[in-house]
C-alpha cells in the first residue's frame, strides 16, 4: 500500500471525516510529540502522555484550520508548544522548580544513569532554552521551523541555543562527561 502524504491524510479527515486517516497521522507523530513533552517535563511520562493527548485532540478539532503554509509536523509542533505554554502558565504558582518530576521507572540498566543525567542537565535551562534545545537537537527542527513553532525571532532562538548549549556543556563536563 502506498504511503499517503500528510496533506492527503489531512484532506481525507477534513473533507470525508475519515478518522482512520487521522489515526495514521497520530501514529506517525505520537512518538515525536510525546518525546518533546518528555523532555519539557523532564521525564514525567504520565504528564507527557496527557499533554500529547491534549495536543492531538486540539489538532483534530482544529484540523480544518490547517492551511498548508507550513508542513503538518510544524503545525502540530506549534499546537504542542501552545499546549505546553498553557500548561506551564496555569501551573506556575504550584510548580516546585527544586523538585523536578523525573521518573526513575526505567529498566534499561546502564542507560538509566545517562538518561537521568541528561534530564538533570535539562533542568538547569530556562523554559525557552530547553524548548529551543530540544526542538533543534532532539527533534531535528531547523531554526526556521523553531521560529514557526515558538513564534520567537530567529536571533532570539540562536541566543537561547547558544546559552543553552553552553550551560549543558558546562554541567555535563562538571559531572564527568568529557568530549
Image (cartoon, grey):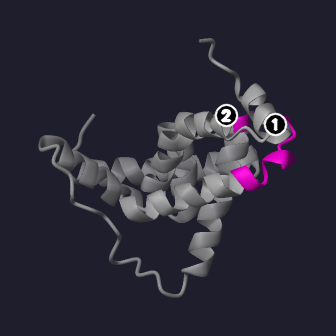
Residue bearing mark 1? 16
Give neighbour class at mark 1: few <14, some 14-19, many 20+ (Cα, 10 Å): few
Residue bearing mark 2? 21
Position in image of residue 110 (x %, y %): 13, 42
Q: Nearer the viewer, mark 1 or mark 2?
A: 1
Q: Name the image quarter holding the C terminus.
A: top left
Which residue appears farthest toward the left when viewing the image? 109
- As drawn, is 141 to the left or to the right of 116? right
| Quadrant hosting residue 66 | top right
Is residue 81 positioned above or below 9 on the image?
below
Q: Is residue 16 magenta?
A: no
Q: Nearer the viewer, residue 150 or 172?
A: 150
Which residue appears farthest toward the top when viewing the image? 1
Position in image of residue 19 (x %, y %): 67, 41
* Of the image marks 1 and 2, the number of the one nearer the N terminus: 1
Mark 1 → mark 2, Cα distance in angstroms: 10 Å
- As drawn, is 20 to the left or to the right of 134? right
Q: Does the image show residue 70?
A: no
- Contact check, label 1 and label 2, Cβ < 8 Å: yes
Q: Does the image show residue 177?
A: yes
- Which labelled disc corresponds to residue 70? none
Q: Nearer the viewer, residue 179 or 108?
A: 108
Give neighbour class at mark 2: few <14, some 14-19, many 20+ (Cα, 10 Å): many
- Residue at image x 55%, y 33%? 28
- Residue at image x 25%, y 54%? 116
The number of callouts visible is: 2
Position in image of residue 76 (x %, y %): 68, 45
Magenta-drawn segment: 60-72
Amino acid at each position: 500500500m502506498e504511503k499517503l502524504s500528510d496533506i492527503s491524510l489531512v484532506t481525507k479527515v477534513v473533507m470525508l471525516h475519515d478518522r482512520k486517516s487521522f489515526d495514521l497521522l497520530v501514529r506517525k507523530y505520537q512518538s515525536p510529540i510525546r518525546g518533546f513533552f518528555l523532555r519539557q517535563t523532564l521525564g514525567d511520562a504520565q504528564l507527557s502522555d496527557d499533554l500529547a493527548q491534549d495536543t492531538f485532540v486540539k489538532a483534530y478539532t482544529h484540523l480544518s484550520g490547517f492551511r498548508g503554509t507550513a508542513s503538518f509536523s510544524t503545525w502540530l509542533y506549534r499546537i504542542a508548544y501552545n499546549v505546553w505554554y498553557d500548561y506551564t502558565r496555569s501551573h506556575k504558582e504550584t510548580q516546585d522548580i527544586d523538585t523536578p518530576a523525573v521518573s526513575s521507572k526505567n529498566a534499561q540498566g546502564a542507560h538509566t544513569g545517562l538518561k537521568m543525567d541528561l534530564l538533570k542537565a535539562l533542568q538547569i535551562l530556562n523554559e525557552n532554552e530547553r524548548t529551543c534545545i530540544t526542538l533543534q537537537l532532539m527533534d531535528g527542527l531547523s531554526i526556521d521551523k523553531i521560529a514557526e513553532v515558538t513564534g520567537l525571532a530567529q536571533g532570539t532562538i540562536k541566543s537561547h541555543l547558544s546559552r543553552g548549549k553552553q550551560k549543558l556543556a558546562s554541567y555535563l563536563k562538571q559531572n564527568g562527561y568529557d568530549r
